[in-house]
Image (spheres, helix red, strand yellow):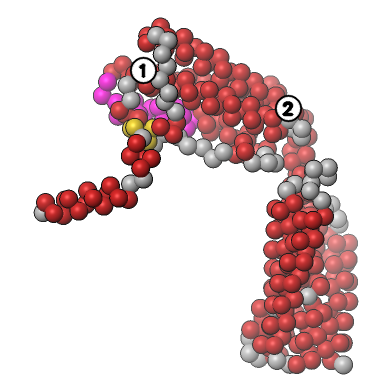
Amino acid sequence: MSFQLFLTIGLFVLVTPWDSRAMKRFIDLSEQEVLALAISNEEEDCRIYLSIAEGLRQQYPASAKLFEDMAAEETRHRGMLYDLYRAKFGEFLPLVRRQDVRGFIKHRPIWLVRPLGLDEVRKYAAETEYETARFYRRAAEQSRDLSVRELLISLADAEDKHESLAEKLGEGILTADVRAKEDETARRVFVLQYVQPGLAGLMDGSVSTLAPLFAAAFATHNTWETFLVGLAASVGAGISMGFAEALSDDGSLTGRGAPLLRGAICGVMTFLGGIGHTLPFLIPNFSAATVVAFVVVAAELAAISYVRYRYMDTPFLAAAFQVVVGGVLVFAAGILIGSS
């Protein structure tokens, strides 16, 4: 029994990261350390809000102003906490940070990502304050020290006030008209950076691979050889389109976003557009494989037409006509070449 206990403890020590073992539990913090942590937390939130404001400034100035005002509130609350700390404990402020406390709130660093998502950062402020308040209350329930419990509850109440402050600031700065304009800007940015490269890749992969695929199909009537031709065409088109999109511009002037991301989106969608009507030729029966491939091609062209209608403001019938005409011409060329 003692050997099993020793083995269990040894395994726990081995699998527990050293940084986790060096961290302190929230419940073990003294009143002084809790207050120091609250001060550090407010300071970090202030810097996060300023970073978000800087990331939004160019495209969403109203939302940037919102986060600047929230950062100013965090600075004011930090000053109030620091005044209280100095009155109780003096000038020395111990360094207690979020990462020093086991189980303390950890947020994804969305402020480091460019471009920033408008809806995501709007929710971030309220979520941050809500989660911090909830953590303080749970910690208060576990605390055995009355003074620490009272302090945690007061901190939770302060965070609740921050959350309502975010809503009030949003109502005052982000009016309906301003929010509508920023939402439209966000939609244009999404189309420019994600939809356009993805649509270009999907169209190229779906249309350009039709000719070699069906030429091979009607020339050989061999489903496996046809599949290999379609796979090679899809992979080659994906690599080619990915590099072409990534090297077209760096996005600094056009606002089209990171070139590597655009290239990856375009390349993957090109491959998917080509492999979709290639996979049916894994069916051994040539006639059945060809019929399924026809159905897949029709579905791909319909999907492309819908995306153009949904995001590119193109009437659906016009989008369908343009895509279908191009697809039919390439499809017919492949069949004629393969049958000759």
Number of marks in the image?
2
Q: Is residue 67 above or below residue 114?
A: above
Quick one: SS at disc 2? helix
Magenta-span inclusion, residue 142: yes
* In this picture, residue 40 sits left or right of residue 304: left
* In this picture, residue 17 sits left or right of residue 11: right
Q: Main secondary structure of the magenta part?
A: helix
Q: Is residue 122 above or below residue 308?
A: above
Residue type at mark 2? Ala
Instruction: Name the residue located 77 percent from the left edge and 30 percent from the top edge.
Output: 177
Q: Is residue 180 above or below residue 247?
A: above
What residue range appears in magenta?
130-145
- Which quarter shows the N terminus? bottom left
* In this picture, residue 153 sits left or right of residue 212: left
Question: As drawn, which residue projects farthest toward the top?
Answer: 87
Instruction: Check residue 62 in the rendering and tell me which mark sits there, or answer none.
Output: 2
Residue 77, percent from left and from top: 52, 16
Residue type at mark 1? Gln
